[in-house]
Amino acid sequence: MNPQKPMTTFATSMLGIGSMIGAGIFALMGEAGNIAGSASWIAFLIAGAVAMLSGWSMARLGARYPAAGGIVEYLTQGFGPGLLAGSLSILLYISAMVALAMVAKTFGSYAAALLSTEGSSRWVNGLADLVVITFVMINLEGARQVARSEGIIVVTKVVILVAFALAGLWFSRPELLSPRHYPPAQQILFSLAITFFAYEGFRVITNTAEDMPNPAKTLPRAMALAISLVTLLYLLVAFAVFGNLDVPAIIQARDYALAEAARPAFGQAGFTIVAIAALISTASSINANLYAVTNVTYQLARDGELPAAFGKPLGRSREGLLISALLIMLGIHFLRLSEIAAVGSITVLIVHLMVHIGHVRLRRETGASLGMILLAIAATLLTIGFAVFYLAEDSPHIIWLVGVALTAALVAEALLQKLRGRVILPRTPEPGRQAH
């Protein structure tokens, strides 16, 4: 392996797994249960299929256009330089900042609970700041250190979650998982946006292409491996949770459903162990996503879309890492993240949808099947549709917030183009580079 290209299939898949198994599975299992009940495992399975289709499309694009910016590059290649690609890129960056602030605050909440200081927002925010600063320091050491630390963290938390799932299945009550308790089919579909958010971190894999020795082979393999393993783990965890607690109990403990599900078998010790796993998982997600966001801002700065400071070297990373960390910490202290996280989920799905639509125009370059791209488009569009339909009745103000986020990104891009007189430009692929 080229030592200057440290992101092997294993290292990259570990990064993707670390990003996916973050706050999502710990915070969203109860929310999914609130909508889909004990059939939530079906929603996680379908969401995994949607993620696999989306990941397949992005992997084909990444094999042809390996760039640190990942999705930013694919949007520019698909739609050309201009308002659309720039607006979507800004929207993706904003969503990533919000998601990272949410994950960091989840870490702070769990840590404060274990320290018996959960009632203090000062402790929650301070611990959230601390974990962000810690992983900024790790990322400053460069991609190799990120890969090493992520491998250790991912293996640790996966071992804990697998042990929890297997023990939970051993002590589970089969009658709680009986199909007679399932809600109507549309309820399962309504929960797809929530369960998909637990996979959303797979896009981080696309940001590693420039650090791969052979992205045409490594990227698709890492994408498929990461999403497959995460889907399997989520199914096991869902069976364990809904096999040990009835739906009302899960809804009551929705913010810590996994930890609560460990009580029947292991008591307070089980609760503590799973809470520690939540800390490891959220820390891992922050590590992986900071790496990805730094690459995205570097790409945008290199192409003139963000100020040059984002792309300037700092240690073995770039100054964009520090700027992003400051924005994340501002979010930790000043934003109410629960509703914004819902907005982030839908806006990310919109960005994914546009990536796949752009891929249709690039399919001869990537060698991708038109039928598979259309499946990715249909699956993503349906997931957005189910989410909007449900929220229109349950939380209509969130739909308005999505509109505000889209408008803000569009206005920001228009102003940047007018003031700087520059637009995102697509990179020229290396001669002869093809997807395989």
Image (tube, rainbow, N blue to C red):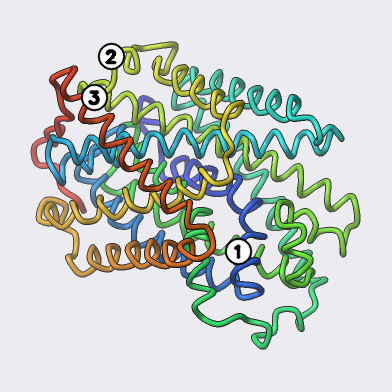
Residue 148: x, y in percent? 54, 31
Q: CA distance from mark 3 to mark 1?
A: 37 Å
Q: Which residue is rendered at x = 56% and y = 24% of the image?
A: 329
The local secondary structure at tag 1 comes to: helix
405 versus 51 height, above or below: above
The local secondary structure at tag 2 comes to: helix
Q: CA distance from mark 1 to mark 2?
A: 42 Å
- Is the C-beta separation of discs 3 and 2 under 8 Å? no
Left or right, residue 393 beside residue 308: right
The local secondary structure at tag 3 comes to: loop
407 versus 35 height, above or below: above
Q: Dot 1 surroundings within 10 Å: few (below 14), some, or many (20 or more)?
A: many
Q: Which mark is residue 308?
A: 2
> In the rendered image, is residue 311 in sight?
yes
Give the mark, 1 or 2, whose residue is nearer the N terminus: 1
> In the rendered image, is residue 229 in sight?
no
Q: Amino acid at mark 1?
A: Ala
Q: Which residue is rendered at x = 17% and y = 36% of the image?
A: 83
Q: Nearer the viewer, mark 1 or mark 2?
A: 1
171 versus 367 height, above or below: below
Specify the quadrant of the image occupied by residue 66: top left
Left or right, residue 171 beside residue 162: right
Q: Which mark is residue 288?
A: none
Q: Dot 2 surroundings within 10 Å: few (below 14), some, or many (20 or more)?
A: some
Specify the quadrant of the image occupied by residue 169: bottom right
Q: Nearer the viewer, residue 93 or 120?
A: 120
Residue labelled with disc 3: 305
Q: Amino acid at mark 2?
A: Ala
